[in-house]
């Protein structure tokens, strides 16, 4: 029986999005986790994204350097634009409620670029797409823990935080399927989309996730977690693919 690539992409990206609910689990026991946990929740996904972005970027360079470079520029511009929705205050529950909506909107926009990454990886090969979806599922858990830290200080319950964490990831399966469909119809865009996905994730890590991690934990620990998780992605990619 032949596997339908569209259904496979939807299933894998959907599982990756649903995994975000696990990020709220540490808060289910009442007290907030230590600040080091929150720092790790930003550092580990950052390293995972760097590893995934490296794989996508090298694949794009193999396809076509000019198109990949153009896509990379668009990816940087996209993340720069989405960061205009960044939360501007850090005053816990007393903060401007609009900041909470901006945080959720920003998370959804960033997840869209990750959905593009899953879709373009599936267009390269089923094995590569499956691997990247699993990698981003791990990333979603850590990123959701950081989001739950933010939302819990605004009075949200654990179940609500878990639901919103998953909601911000729903753009992943939608964009993954859309990206695969477009690339199936117009395969000439493959290199450009690979460049876009790689640079968008690199920009997100360097411009937002790592600086946020530094606000919660020691720089040495964060550097170790980031580099270790990036190396783990590359190791398992070399081992499994």
Image (cartoon, rainbow, N blue to C red):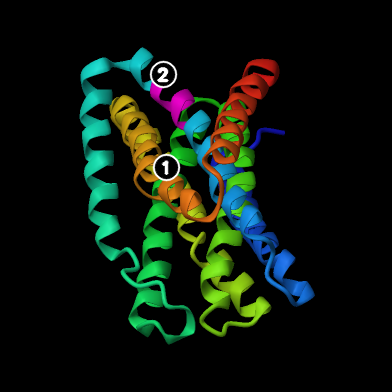
- Residue 4 visible, this angle: no
Q: Check disc 2 and report the residue beneath it.
A: 58
Give the dominant element type of the magenta stretch: helix, strand or loop: helix
- Magenta-drawn segment: 53-59
Residue 24, position as x, y percentages in the image: 67, 66
Q: CA distance from mark 1 to mark 2?
A: 18 Å
Q: Nearer the viewer, residue 16 or 186?
A: 16
Q: Label 2 near label 1: C-beta < 8 Å?
A: no
Indicate yes or no whether the magenta region holds residue 198: no
Residue, x 61% and y 59% (percent of image)? Answer: 35
Q: How many marks?
A: 2
Residue, x 53% and y 74% (percent of image)? Answer: 151
Q: Nearer the viewer, residue 64 or 54?
A: 54
25 horizontally vs 120: left or right: right
Q: Quadrant of the C terminus?
A: top right
Residue, x 20% and y 29% (percent of image)? Answer: 70
Regarding mark 1 in the picture, which secondary structure is present there? Answer: helix
- Residue 131 location, quadrant: top right
Give whichever of discs 1 and 2 has the lower sequence position. 2
210 horizontally vs 128: left or right: left
Residue 27, position as x, y percentages in the image: 70, 70
Regarding mark 2 in the picture, which secondary structure is present there? Answer: helix
33 horizontally vs 177: left or right: right
Q: Check disc 1 and report the residue beneath it.
A: 205
Q: Which one is closest to the eye, mark 1 or mark 2?
A: 1
Q: Nearer the viewer, residue 17 or 9?
A: 17
- Residue 99 visible, this angle: yes
- For label 2, the crowd category at 10 Å Cα-Cα, with few meaning under 14, some 14 to 19 and many 20 or more, is some
In the displayed structure, 132 sits above or below 32; it is above
Residue 107, position as x, y percentages in the image: 43, 61
Residue, x 72% and y 33% (percent of image)? Answer: 1
Residue 3, position as x, y percentages in the image: 65, 36
């Amino acid at each position: 029986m032949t596997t339908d690539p569209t259904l496979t992409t939807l299933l894998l990206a959907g599982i990756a999005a649903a995994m975000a609910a696990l990020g709220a689990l540490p808060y289910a026991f009442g007290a907030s986790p230590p600040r080091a946990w929150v720092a790790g929740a930003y550092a580990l996904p950052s390293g995972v994204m760097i590893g995934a972005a490296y794989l996508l970027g090298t694949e794009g360079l193999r396809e076509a350097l000019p198109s990949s470079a153009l896509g990379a520029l668009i990816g940087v511009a996209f993340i720069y634009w989405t960061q205009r929705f960044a939360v501007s205050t850090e005053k816990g529950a007393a903060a401007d409620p609009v900041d909470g909506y901006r945080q959720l909107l920003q998370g959804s926009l960033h997840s869209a670029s990750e959905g593009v990454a899953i879709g373009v990886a599936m267009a390269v090969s089923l094995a590569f797409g499956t691997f990247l979806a699993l990698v981003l599922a791990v990333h979603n858990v850590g990123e959701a823990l950081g989001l739950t830290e933010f939302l819990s200080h605004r009075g949200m319950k654990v179940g609500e935080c878990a639901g919103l964490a998953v909601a911000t990831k729903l753009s992943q399966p939608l964009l993954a399927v859309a990206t695969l469909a477009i690339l199936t119809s117009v395969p000439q865009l493959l290199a450009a989309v690979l460049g876009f996905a790689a640079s968008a994730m690199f920009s997100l890590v360097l411009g937002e996730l790592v600086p946020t991690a530094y606000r919660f934990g020691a720089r040495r620990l964060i550097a170790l977690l980031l580099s270790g998780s990036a190396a783990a992605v590359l190791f398992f990619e070399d081992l499994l693919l």
